[in-house]
Image (cartoon, coloured by chain):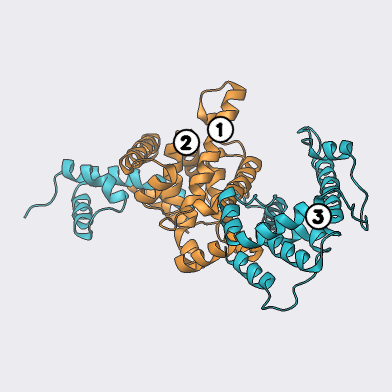
Amino acid sequence: MSGLTCQQARNLFDAHLNRELSDDLSTEITAHCLRCPSCRQELALLEVAGQVIRAEHDEPSLPDDFTDRLVACIQRQPVAPIPFYRRARVLWTAGPALAAACLLLVVGLWPEPRPTHVLGEKETREQTEARMKPIPPDVSLDEATLALQERFQRGASAARNTLDSLGEASKRTLRATLQAIWPETDGAAPIMEGLPQPADTASPDAAMAGEVEDL
Amino acid sequence: MHVSQSSEEGSLDRRAEQRLIDRAKRGDSQALRELIDAHKDRLFAFLWRIIRNHHDAEELCQEAFLKAFSSLDSFSSEYRFSTWLFTIGYRLCLNAMRRKKALSGEVDFSIFSAAEPGADEETAQSEEARRLKELVWGQVDRLSPPQRAAVVLFYRHEQSCHEIAQVLQLPVATVKSHLHRARARLKEMLEPLMADDARRDRILGELAG
């Protein structure tokens, strides 16, 4: 069998350079180039740029602290809010406890008798409105963080005032419910402080917490 | 710095990578760190070759990681993490170049070329070899962004046409066409230099050595 013609060989150059040819066909090309100076030169010209590009080692590198800075940057990013459908799932799981807690909260919020304000001050209507107003987009990150912290503390304080009027059993149920709705307990910590810890790991609170973690 | 597929393969096999991704999804900072360290140099080298500016490439590299980590839930394990990361980086790079073009009013992508010299000038090579390198990279910088990306991914990162197609989000046939055109342009530029085989062999020998 005779070898490749020049045209056949050149038609295969791209596939050869792309490393897509079988060993047999690549050998055919090599064999053709050995006996044909013109195709040998053509293939060499096509190969030379690739060899120069492969052999390059003058490339800059990233600064040494790139990873540290990037990890710090990722950790500064706000935790994404839990999507509503996941909240819905948690609420479904916590259904009966939530119903009880809602009832207790309504009782707790009833105007008479007013709870004793152990922690924090009672929030005025103006303060509540200020707390609900969106933070303007042009404030600095630090200002926004401070405003958020202040708002959350005032909000938590208002919630705590309500909690104080609840009985121990109601507080325990409420704790379980809050934990279910708000799995990142850090976020709910100021409210959680006012609620009793579960008595033991077999309590409904612990079971609920475990269930939430698995979600 | 030499980047190659083998360095990536050597550092992380697919199962180890998937475990790291699972941990990263749960916010494990050590896993994030390992994923970044495994891919940052290759991604940065690729982006720098396309945008040709150290500062821009570093920013794009960081942005690509941030984007990748913030959308890890949508990462499909049928791809390699590096392919996904390079795809994000390349898209960000194209957007940045378009923004620059819009600001400067320039149409020619070669404005991004040879913006700065490489890190250390190699002194061990002959004048001929240095000239050849300058010519080749100068021509690579004048290729269109997809052609340049295809050439860099193929030769520097040793990716197959199929992998390049995934990164550039193009059909494999288009990638092959980009490589074909790029090689043709490079060959055309080199033709006057290739007067005799002995001279070519000597220069290539020096480059390899």
Q: Residue furthest left?
A: A1
Whether residue A128 is visible, yes or no, is yes
Q: Are marks 2 and 1 on the same chain?
A: yes
Instruction: Report which residue position mark 3 lands on.
Output: A108
Callout 3: few (<14), some (14-19), or many (20+) C-alpha neighbours within 10 Å? Answer: many
Report helix, strand or loop for mark 2: helix
Mark 1 — on which chain does it sit?
B
Report helix, strand or loop for mark 3: helix
Horizontal relation, residue A29 to residue A59: left or right: left
Point 91% across, 47% down: residue? A122
Point 55% across, 39% down: residue? B93
Whether residue A56 is visible, yes or no, is no
- Visual hue assigned to chain A: cyan
Mark 3 — on which chain does it sit?
A
Disc 2/disc 3 C-alpha distance (Å): 66 Å
Q: Are marks 2 and 3 on the same chain?
A: no
Q: Position of residue B201 (x, y in %)?
A: 38, 52
Nearer the observer, B133 or A141: A141
Cβ atoms at labels 3 and 1 below 8 Å apart: no
Q: Residue furthest top?
A: B105
Q: Position of residue A96 (x, y in %)?
A: 62, 61
Image chain in orange? B
Q: Residue furthest front?
A: A112
Given the image, on which type of amino acid does mark 2 rest? Pro
Q: Are marks 3 and 1 on the same chain?
A: no
Given the image, on which type of amino acid does mark 1 rest? Met
Image mark for residue B145: 2
Image mark for residue A158: none
Instruction: Report which residue position mark 1 lands on.
Output: B97
Where is residue B100, by image quadrant?
A: top right
